[in-house]
Amino acid sequence: MKIEPFEMERYQSVYEYVVEYDLAESGVHPFTLRELLGHDDAVQRFLDVRLGYPQSEGTPELRETVAALYPHAIDDNVLVTNGSSEAIFTSAWRLFEKGDELVLMQPNYQQLWGLAKTWGVKVKPLVLREDLGWQFDPEDLKQLVTKKTRAIQVCNPNNPTGAIMAEAQRKALLDAVEDAGAWLLSDEVYQGAEREAGETETLWGPYEKTIVTNGLSKAYGLPGLRVGWLVGPARTVEELMGYHDYLTLTPTMLSDRLARLVLEKRRRREILGRTRSILRKNYPALRDWLEAHGTLFSHVAPAAGAICWIKYAFPMNSTELVERLRKEKSTLLVPGDMFGMDGYVRIGIGPPTDYLVAGLDRFDALLREMKAGKAR
């Protein structure tokens, strides 16, 4: 079967480890294993873990720990996956058939868009509007949803804009899926990475046909653990376990144990506190850099996530701009057209501050050279 290329993931995979400054990453600076485990006793206990298979759906202890994050959920509502991307794939594989309709928030992480295109599912974009603070217009949603709608998928907090869905949009979304009898797919992998607001309320709970996906990559700074999960109706989760058997089958025993440690209530609070402190320090550095360029750049301040979605005011394709920055200054960003919106770039604000500033200095150098070239 031919697939729709996942341009952004392929682009980052090829270049993120060969540039000097990677500002394409959307999570915070990752922990080391020693930082995560802390004291020597914890290290020794971890070294004694026997490397057998854990349960394919995740150990009961981890599933119970994840379930505790969601109102009225139990372990039967949880399937542990290798990253949230596997959770999204597994859900979509179970739900969609050729000819179905999917209403998909845009801009958005493009995984489900590519899968839908590959499988012959009709995609109807639910466009986020910059003039509304990157919210969708509820009237647009009403026009898109029909009795043929199989699912509505949202990313909340949103990638790449960093916007958190407002209450009016949340109500409109829940009304729409209920009226259509459609599934609600909610990617919540940036939950917990709010810069100032409290933790974003999950969409799990009010509506039965809901599948929430999340994981430890973005807000927790632990992408290398490859731990994700989905939360859904117990009967659906049981079906999804059979689909998961055809994929990676099981998380690793080491990741399962570490995830239980991370999601322990006190430790989770500490880890997400670290995330907030990184974002509160780094966003002002980026904001000051943008403001120093006057009208060349504009943006809506991201409410969550280690990302900023930036509009630029000069006539150049976003991939062309990012490619020049990569080739000439060894610095990587994500071009807007890989999210279906040219004229924007996504800059990650999760690395150490001095690294972020140094990468922005490289961008400055390119802009100066571009200006000098135009002047000549």
Image (tube, rainbow, N blue to C red):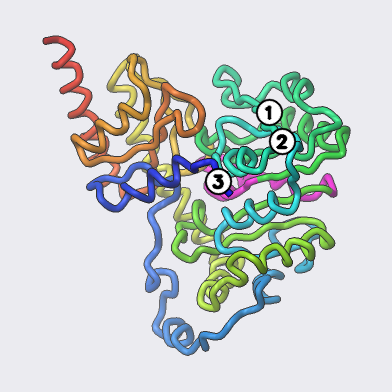
Q: Main secondary structure of the magenta part?
A: loop
Q: Nearer the viewer, residue 203 or 278?
A: 203
Determine if the magenta segment contains residue 193.
yes
Q: Residues within 10 Å of mark 1 (few under 14, many from 20)?
A: some
Q: Earlier in the sequence, mark 2 or mark 1?
A: 2
The answer to whether the residue labelled 2 contacts the one labelled 1, judged by CB atoms less than 8 Å apart, is yes
Residue 349 at what x, y percent from top left? 38, 42
Q: Amino acid at mark 1?
A: Lys
Residue 261 at what x, y percent from top left? 55, 72
Q: Which residue is mark 3?
A: 2
Residue drawn at the location 26% of the way across and 40% of the way down: 331
Residue 11 at what x, y percent from top left? 38, 43
Q: Is residue 90 left or right of residue 251?
A: right
Q: Residues within 10 Å of mark 2 (few under 14, many from 20)?
A: many
| The furthest residue to the front | 1
The quadrant of the image that shows the C terminus is top left
Q: Nearer the viewer, mark 2 or mark 3?
A: 3
Q: Amino acid at mark 2?
A: Leu
Q: Which residues are magenta?
A: 187-208
Callout 3 secondary element? loop
Q: Amino acid at mark 3?
A: Lys
Q: Which residue is mark 2?
A: 102
Q: Earlier in the sequence, mark 2 or mark 3?
A: 3
Residue drawn at the location 68% of the way across and 45% of the way down: 186
Residue drawn at the location 78% of the way across and 62% of the way down: 239
Q: Which residue is mark 1?
A: 124
Q: Earlier in the sequence, mark 1 or mark 3?
A: 3
